[in-house]
Amino acid sequence: MLSFAQILVLALIQGAAELLPVSSSAHVIVAEKLMGLDPSSPEMVMLLVMLHTGTMFAVIAYFWKDWRRHYFSAPGKLRWFAILLVIATFCTGMVGLGLKLVIEKVFLHGSPHAEVEALFSNLPLIAGALASVGVLIIVAGMKEEKSPSNQEIQPSHACWIGIVQGLCLPFRGFSRSGSTISTGLLLGLPKKALEEFSFALAVVLTPAIIAQEAHRLLKEQLPGSHVSLAHLMAPSLAGMVFSFLAGLLALKWLSRWLEGGRWKLFGIYCLVAAAAVLTIHFKMKG
């Protein structure tokens, strides 16, 4: 059973890191490892999903005024924004589901737990994902400094952003916001529009993830199982509230750094975090 202190720490880490391009999942999983918890257990998976729910509500609260002003003010703008979100989400679903099948049917074939969730606690894989997104953020930040743009997001841009977001889904450490915003910067899109679009995608994607994990947890409640969904929900709801508050603060930080031209500093942090995760892995193995 999780203690209140553990829930508070994990919620603050999730809320602060989820809305920064540094991969909240990687930070939460490492924290769970250091606490002696199993990140792939139903209790931890449910907690992580509810922490994501808290940050989703933080995104809605933070961006609501901008979305209402830019997209909800006219039916045509809202329709166009919705079309872009649908295109990106469709591409994310196709790539994410495809990767999930390949990983489970090819790379994990024959293993006792041939599910993509088995990779979530793999620290070397997390370190590699952190390093990859770190390089992507640095390159995108350098390009944006040289050629800032004011062009609007088009369906082709939404498609590429959705594809990259899909690549992030199976790999903890490959920051969703870091990769989608960086992809947009490399495509020559403006920072403010990318920030709003990237987090609107998160709001669309999160309910699907919650539904998937709820289904997975319900399967654990087969006859003879000791897992209770109601038992898992209580600590998760408390964590959701804390992650919501931390998420609001993180969004203000992200906006200042993105608009202030310090985007690549997040990439440098991801490279340092990747080295730290590998160090933790080898120390735990030793």
Image (spheres, helix red, strand yellow):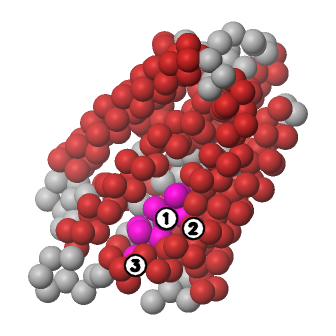
- In the rendered structure, which disc, 2 or 3, sits on the residue that comes first in sequence? 3
Residues 40 and 71: in front is 71
Badge 3: how crowded within 10 Å, few (<14), some, or many (20+)? Answer: some
Q: Which residue does the numbered mark 2 point to in the structure image?
A: 240
- The residue positioned farthest toward the front in the image shown: 74
As shown in the figure, which amino acid type bears the numbered disc 2?
Met
Q: Residue at x 71, y 46 (%)?
A: 62
Quadrant in the rendering for residue 136: top right
As shown in the figure, which amino acid type bears the numbered disc 1?
Met
Q: Which residue does the numbered mark 3 point to in the structure image?
A: 232
**Separation of residues labelled 1 and 3 (CA atoms):** 10 Å
Left or right position of 10 against 79: right
Horizontal and vertical percent position of residue 199: 60, 39
Q: Which residues are magenta?
A: 43-53
Q: Residue at x 38, y 27 (%)?
A: 91
The chief SS type of the magenta part is: helix
Above or below, 36 against 265 in this view is: below
Camera sees residue 262? yes
Q: Which residue does the numbered mark 1 point to in the structure image?
A: 50
Q: Are marks 1 and 3 in contact (CB under 8 Å)?
A: no
Q: Residue at x 38, y 83 (%)?
A: 231
